[in-house]
Image (cartoon, rainbow, N blue to C red):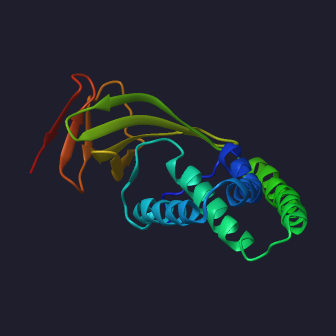
Amino acid sequence: MHNVNFEGGGTTFILFIFPLIGLFLEHNTAHSRIYWTLGISALLLIPIFTPWHYIIPYAYPILLLILLAAGYAVFLQMSDNQRVKTVMSVVITVMLFLILGFQNVVSSFAAGSNKRIVKKWTFKNYNVEYTVDQGFAGHALIGYELSQHKFIFSRHIESAMGKDTTTNCMIQFPVHKIRFDKCNGSLETFR
């Protein structure tokens, strides 16, 4: 599950509301559609267990939110008392907000890292990204990241860290025998 990215806090906050969305689904959606939603979101989360991930930003947090909300709606179907369902959903949402919100604030101060993509080159089935990862203190970690993309999926292949020089245009990815010429913007294989 290394592809799930909840850093930065923005995506963690959407997970607080899954009980309320589940309550809405249970109240306003046919039971068969809830089961279909649950199944489809579970199937779409399968790539999380592979090196491939969606190129769509925040796909995993959104799919996880849908899965949790549909699962919670199925759980709510066991009770007929609408008042109990509503109170339970609000209480769980508030508890998630308190627990995950506190954890999110603490972890954002502890990590203090800011990774950004400075430049991106796109080739037929590959992307090369020039990244700068500035931690809380010290020098920034610079590097190039090579990824492969197919259809709506992408996977990280290799990183070349600390290779940014003004005199050398060639960035080597030796494990996969790929060379990137940043001056000409070309990608080639070598032996």
* Depth check, front residue: 57 or 166: 57
* Depth check, front residue: 88 or 26: 26
Apparent side of residue 5 relative to residue 14 in the rendered image (left or right): left
Q: Residue at x 21, y 22 (%)?
A: 184
- Whether residue 74 is visible here, answered yes or no, is yes
- In the image as oriented, which residue stretches furthest toward the left? 191
* Depth check, front residue: 150 or 137: 150
Apparent side of residue 45 relative to residue 11 in the rendered image (left or right): left
Rendering coords of residue 47 (x, y %): 40, 62
Apparent side of residue 29 relative to residue 161 in the rendered image (left or right): right
Q: Residue at x 81, y 72 (%)?
A: 80
Rendering coords of residue 16 (x, y %): 76, 54
Rendering coords of residue 38 (x, y %): 54, 64
- Whether residue 158 is visible here, answered yes or no, is no
> Is residue 176 placed above or below 132 in the rendered structure?
below
Rendering coords of residue 146 (x, y %): 32, 44
Apparent side of residue 108 relative to residue 49 in the rendered image (left or right): right
Res. 44 image quadrant: bottom left
> Is residue 43 placed above or below 133 in the rendered structure?
below
